Image (tube, grey):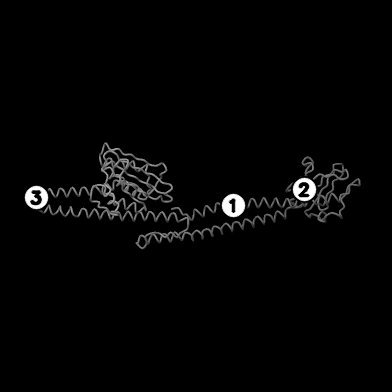
Amino acid sequence: MKSLERQLQTSLAIVLLLILLGLVIVANLSTRSLLEEFVTSRLELDAERLLDTLDTSIQNPRVRQGRINPVYNTPDSGHYYAIKFNRDINALYSPSLQNEKLRTPIDSDLKHGMATVVHDVMGPKEQHLIVWTKAYSKNGQNMTISIAEDMSLLMKNRQYFSLLFIIIGVVGFFLILALQRFVIRRLFKHLDKSRQEIQQIELGKRKQLSEDVPTEIYPLVKEFNRSLSLMQQRMERSRNSLGNLAHALKTPLSLLMQQLDSDEAEQGLEQAKRQAERIRQLTDRELKRARLAGLGNTTQRFDPREELATLIDVLKQAHQKQNLKVSLNINKAVKLFGDREDMLELLGNLMDNAYKWAKSHVKLSVDIDQKQKEISLIVEDDGTGKTIEELELLAQRGVRLDESVEGHGLGLAICNDIVKLYDGSICFSQSKGLGGFKVTVRLPIVINE
């Protein structure tokens, strides 16, 4: 079983690790670049000052030591310079080098008019130096000035900063994971509430789940309540159907038992046959309703293009009218709608009546009105139809019609129940095109259907 909390924790951990790694790399490169830029700018300034203190008016140029920064006179201070002349003149080195040499770039590595920076140059006492070198000219004397500074302390401080940054990042990483876990478990308490409500529904203490839930859970709760409502309505219709069937069977069975107990054997046998035929008809009717509903998920959406073709084949086999023409028109804009079992039972009953009374033609139309936001289902036949008085009577009979009477009344009570469940409307009229009976059902389009 997959844990949603574990998946969220894992996803967040991966994202945070990538972010932390990126921040460490960026911080490391940024601090190194900033340090080097700061040091090289200071070395350039020292080189300019050193050039000002350089006396080139004499045959052997020299640096006026009293006018330079004292760190260049302190032994092993980590601040050094070297001045090399193009002519055959001895190079000048800072007293801080103590007769050691400073490794500087060769002339071929120098760029005209630009400074050259060399990193990690080994200096006295294994100091890690950064060497800044640039060519100058003063009083006709060409030279290169190299200024060096020990970066060991700065790099050590940078490493300390990087380590501190990583520690803070790791601590923050685990704190964020712990905070996310706390928030997720707090939010999941809403699911615990819904689970308790489901248990209450099972015990009969509630009819639906509370919809006072977070936005992300609301569609799930709404769909559960919709399915629960459909199941309750379907169960109620099943109970009504069973009650009707039991009531309808009660009288024929009583009469059958009386005729079997009667002394008039021949007349009793004839009456028994009629009652047995009546029982068979009632049984066939219920089996036909079950056959019209077909197989499939009880909460599946109704696909008219897929289901209606199968429904028409079932009715053709049931009625055995070879010359009957069936016209099926489905608007291309119509998508899945309603509950599969409800729509099959609704259209199955309407089409069953049309098949029964049609002479040669039955027409079924499925259309959609985007402005009114409703689906229209129209079933027509070319049978004898109904008079105005009969149509008014059908409209007035309302929720329950007598299902024991053969004809258009068969199944219309079920149709009324289903249409009422969907807050729709059902209308009975005369078909202008075919001349027979016409039933128009309008169902509102439910959002997210």
User: Tag 1, which secondary structure?
Assistant: helix
Extreme-top residue of the structure: 323
The answer for how far apart the CA atoms under marks 3 and 2 are is 130 Å
Amino acid found under the numbered disc labelled 1 = Ile
3 and 2 marks in contact (CB < 8 Å): no
Establish if 328 lies above or below 200: above
Residue receiving disc 3: 265
- Point out the tag, 2 or 1, that comes first from the N-terminus: 1
Q: Tag 2's secondary structure?
A: strand
- Residue situated in front as seen by the camera: 150 or 166: 166
The residue labelled by disc 1 is 19
Q: CA distance from mark 1 to mark 3?
A: 96 Å
Residue at 39% across, 56% down: 225
Label 3 crowd (10 A; few <14 / some 14-19 / many >=20):
few
Image coordinates of residue 273 in percent, x first then y, are 15, 48
Q: Which mark is residue 132?
A: 2
